[in-house]
Structure formats: C-alpha cells, structure tokens
Amino acid sequence: MNGMTVDLRIASYNILADAYVKPEWFPHTPADLLQPRRRHAPLVQRIVGLDADIVCLQEVEPDSFTALQEGLAPHGYTGVMAQKGQGRLDGCAVFHRWERSPGHRTHYFKDRLEDGRISGHLALVVDFDVGGARLRVACTHLRWDRPDRPVEQHQGMQQATELIDELVRKDPEALWIVCGDFNARPGEPLVQAFEAAGLRDAYAGQHQPTCNANGIPKTIDFLFHSAALRARPDPLSALDERTPLPSEQEPSDHLPICARLLR
C-alpha cells in the first residue's frame, strides 16, 4: 500500500435508541423531543451536517435505520445494519458515500451474560477500497460494566480484546478504523488495549466529554485508526452537567465525533 493516498472523513455517533429512552433520565429535555421517532428527521440533518464519507452509528433500531436510509439517500449515502442478538432491539449501522463496498461482516462477541447466554453484542465490519488501499471499518458498542470490576472479568474489556485479537490482528495488512461507544474513559485499561494494539486515538490529547448521561459529562466515544493514517479531529461542543441532551440542537444524548484521516 506504499504511496497510496487516503483522504476521507469518518464519524461515529451513538444516536440513542428509542427503546432506551426513559423521560426521568433526561429531566432537562422537553418531553416532546423524547417521543418515539420524533428524533429521526433531526438525526438525518445532524448526520448530513457532518459531511463524512463514512458514518458509524450505534443504538440503531430497525425503524430508525429505515428512516435514516430514506433521509440520507438523497445525499448519496447507502447503509448496512446489524442487529444485536438475544432479543436486543438495537444494533450498529454504517453509512457511506462510495458507489459500493466490497463487503461487510458481523462479528458477534463470545462473552456471556450472568445467566450464561451469549451477550449478543457485536462489531459490524465494513470493507472499502479507498484510493487503492484496503480499508476496514469496525463499528461497535462495547458493553458497559462496573469500572471497579477486575480487568480480567470486565465484559467490555473481553469484547475489546476479542475485537483486537480476532479482527484487527488477524488482518494486519489492512488499514483499520475501530470506532463507537466504548463505555470506557480515556486512560482506562479498555482504551489502553487499543493503543497497545498499535492503533491511534484520533482525539488523543484533545478529549472532551461526548455525552451527558445522568448529569455526568464523560468521554466514552472513540475513533481509533491505524498508525499509517493521520487524524485531524473536528472540535466538539462543550458539555457540562447542566447541558441538556437530547436538545433542539442535539438529537441524541451523545455528540458525534468526526475526523479527517489522511495518508
């Protein structure tokens, strides 16, 4: 791949599944903004405004995926969705503006719930040919677990390790982007695992809160990329504990993160 040029914009965005909306969790958000499907049109507008070539979405439900397909198609986007297992109502989706993608696959993690069932969480991996380079984009929503749980038992850490070992390290020749809601913060072992695997954090040294859950602003959304790429991340709006999310301006309880990647 030496000498091949890559220049693209990529975004990652947890769009907040309607199934997970409880009004008491969003006391500063007007009730009408939390009505089912009310946020579909604003989400389309927010995504279009990112002007990204690839958009990786989490907490996507089938009806929201259909609405996004219809709303984004006039802007040149096509998409694919993978739904979580175990009866979960949401999943991940990737939209892009290229004429076609060579393919995609869904990797379901092997970690188990407390009752012994497979968790159903996944990574959606979409392949692209960008300027002659082979690019693989993994969109995921890693499972939340208590931060005080030992690292070897932490379920999000198990998923992250599996993603790195069974996807990224098994295809070292590809250019990789791994992004999504990691349910972990900068400096925590889960995040450090991606850095130890040789991936770069697009927002390294520039982290700001990406969501305001339960009145606690925190950085839990990440965009990692192969070291062969250089990142120019978009600045984020400032969040504090009083910032209402969702709001008229922001249709999710997360902010999208976006970067230009160059080679």
Image (cartoon, rainbow, N blue to C red):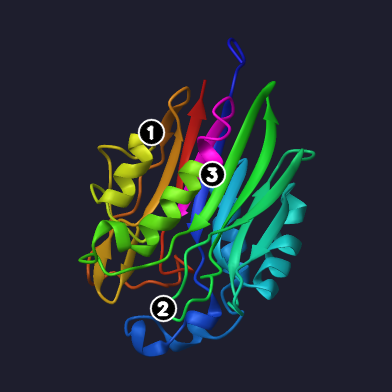
Question: Quick check: 175 left or right of 62?
Answer: left
Task: Name the residue that disc number 3 marks.
Answer: 166
First reached walking from the N terminus: tag 2 or tag 3? 2
Mark 1, Cα crowd under 10 Å, few <14 / some 14-19 / many 20+, is: many
Q: Is residue 232 above or below residue 97?
A: above
Q: What residue type is labelled 2?
A: Glu
Number of numbered callouts drawn? 3
Callout 1–callout 3 Cβ contact below 8 Å: no
Read off the magenta span: 167-180
Q: What residue type is labelled 1?
A: Arg
Q: Is residue 33 visible?
A: no
Residue 79: x and y in percent read 71, 54
Task: Name the residue that disc number 2 marks.
Answer: 114
Q: In this view, does 249 lie above or below 72?
A: below
Residue at 66% over, 62% down: 82
Please say whether residue 93 is one of the residues in the magenta stretch.
Answer: no
**Disc number placed over residue 103 in the picture, else none:** none
Q: Which amino acid does label 3 sit on?
A: Glu
Residue 49: x and y in percent read 56, 51
Mark 2, Cα crowd under 10 Å, few <14 / some 14-19 / many 20+, is: few
